[in-house]
Amino acid sequence: MNFQNLKLSKYLCDQLDAVGVRSPTEIQINCIPKILDGIDCIGCAKTGSGKTLAFALPILQKLWEEPYGIFALVLTPTRELAYQIADQFAVIGKSKNLRHCVVTGGMEMIVQARELSNKPHIVVATPGRLADHLESCNTFSLKRIQFLVLDEADRLLGGRFDKQITTIFNALPKERQTLLFSATMTDTLEKVKKITKKNTFVFESTAEVKTVDELEQFYVLCPYNVKDGYLVEIVRNFREKDEKGLIMIFTDTCKNCQLLHMTLNEVGFNTVELHAMISQRERLASLAKFKSHVSKILIATDVASRGLDIPAVSLVINHIIPNNATDYVHRVGRTARAGRQGLAVSIVTQHDIKIVQAIENKINIRLKEYDVSGLHVAKILTQVHVTKREAQIKLDETDFDERRLINKRKKLINEGKDPDKVEQEIKRQRKEKRRKRFERKNIEEKNSINSYQCADNEEENFK
């Protein structure tokens, strides 16, 4: 099977051959002909299976048949994924002067508004910023688009972007072709399947295992307070075996991400960070350094867990394992892409056992134990703890926490809420939880005392 068999034009096939893409993947074989026939599509397949080209190629073919702007709108949940999708459109459509526009937060709205007014063929956007443009200016229209694509649709339709999605959908024509793609079929997408048109084509990979065969998955069990020591040892061991491979380290919060970045740099590793508390230009700069192998370690929150295609990533480490099995699938999907080998190691504590079991049930694979020398960890543990504490002091001297609070208040104001009232309500709820916990503890203590007294009375009666 080749791309010409999928009804694609010779021009597109030649462009694919020029960039080294010669054989279509399963999702491309199933979805591209249906999209070319004008059928709405829901596609779900493993990470790294070529979902972007599955919708980009038929969109470009239809565009060249009747070129005008704005022809297609692609929505993504993260800024980095938006830039990556735009790059893939640009590579395939370069020789035909494809005009595209990326609309995300963190960049100048005036510049974006000017680009939108020039009617680019393809608009790739995050929901929040595009909704802002639709509400604040009328220099462009989405009423003539032919294609609407929701990439990582499970995340976009999961509830977090409902208000922005509603604003965008109100600006779209009713007659359009809608394409939904994701690596995981969640309850949200199951509901979407039930309410879609009768002729909607739904492709879901039949593989029982939700991660690719080339990915080896391990866990390291350790006490919580020595996780950082184990992280450093895992990175050091891997670097001894593979000097060129890229490493992605995932953690839970922006602050932890920044702390790990500062700590690992101090203990001798060259790292870059990627999280929501740095500017968009810094985020793009970090990604550029990582992709170009200037820095071979990227420490990130879940903003980097979806869609990013960096084939040279050899190792993914979960410093904090995600509570959601779906997020785990997306994180480890950053390695073992396009048929390459990959390794994923999750550092877990005694409190994470149930989470690991849920992940194993989701991916239908048992994680294997990764061998890390406890003696080697013990030797470096003091140095790692001291370095992290120094990094914590340096971070506290900056306005990091203050910026986080300011961003939180801005978000509440944009949602039409009073930040002070929301803060008071949160405090009230916390106080109520503490009160209930205290009452529950008192009841448990009373029950315990009563049970001891009953036991003593029974013992006296027995005597």
Image (tube, grey):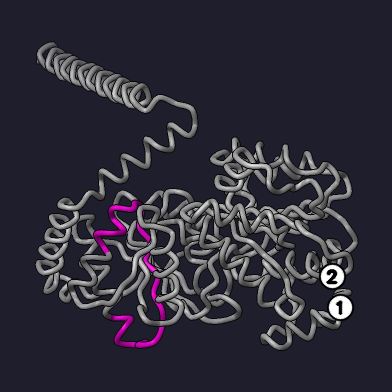
SS category of the residue bearing label 2 = helix
The location of residue 167, given as percent across then percent down, is: 65, 37
Amino acid found under the numbered disc labelled 2: Trp
Residue shown at the point (23%, 55%) measured from the top left: 224
Q: Are marks 2 and 1 in contact (CB under 8 Å)?
A: yes
Q: 68 or 191: which is nearer to us?
A: 68
Which image quarter holds the N terminus? bottom right
Residue shown at the point (45%, 69%) measured from the top left: 217
Task: Answer with mark 2 or mark 1, whichever residue precedes in sequence.
Answer: 1
Q: 26 or 207: which is nearer to us?
A: 26
Binning the other alpha carbons within 10 Å of mark 2 as few (below 14), some (14 to 19) or many (20 upward) gives few
Kindly identify which numbered label has been placed on residue 9: 1
Which image quarter holds the C terminus? top left
- Point out the stretch of residues depicted in magenta: 237-260
Q: 245 or 208: which is nearer to us?
A: 245
Q: Vertically, is 329 above or below 295?
A: above
Instruction: Please tell me in which quadrant of the rendered image residue 436 appears.
Output: top left
Determine if residue 348 is in view.
yes
Amino acid found under the numbered disc labelled 1: Ser
Instruction: Please tell me in which quadrant of the rendered image residue 220 appears.
Output: bottom left
Q: Does 258 lie within the magenta span?
A: yes
Tell me the CA gap for discs 2 and 1: 10 Å
Nearer the camera: disc 2 or disc 1: 2
Q: Vertically, is 358 above or below 332?
A: above
Binning the other alpha carbons within 10 Å of mark 1 as few (below 14), some (14 to 19) or many (20 upward) gives some
Kindly identify which numbered label has been placed on residue 64: 2
Residue shown at the point (84%, 65%) measured from the top left: 67
The location of residue 292, given as percent across then percent down, is: 44, 81
Give the total of numbered labels.
2
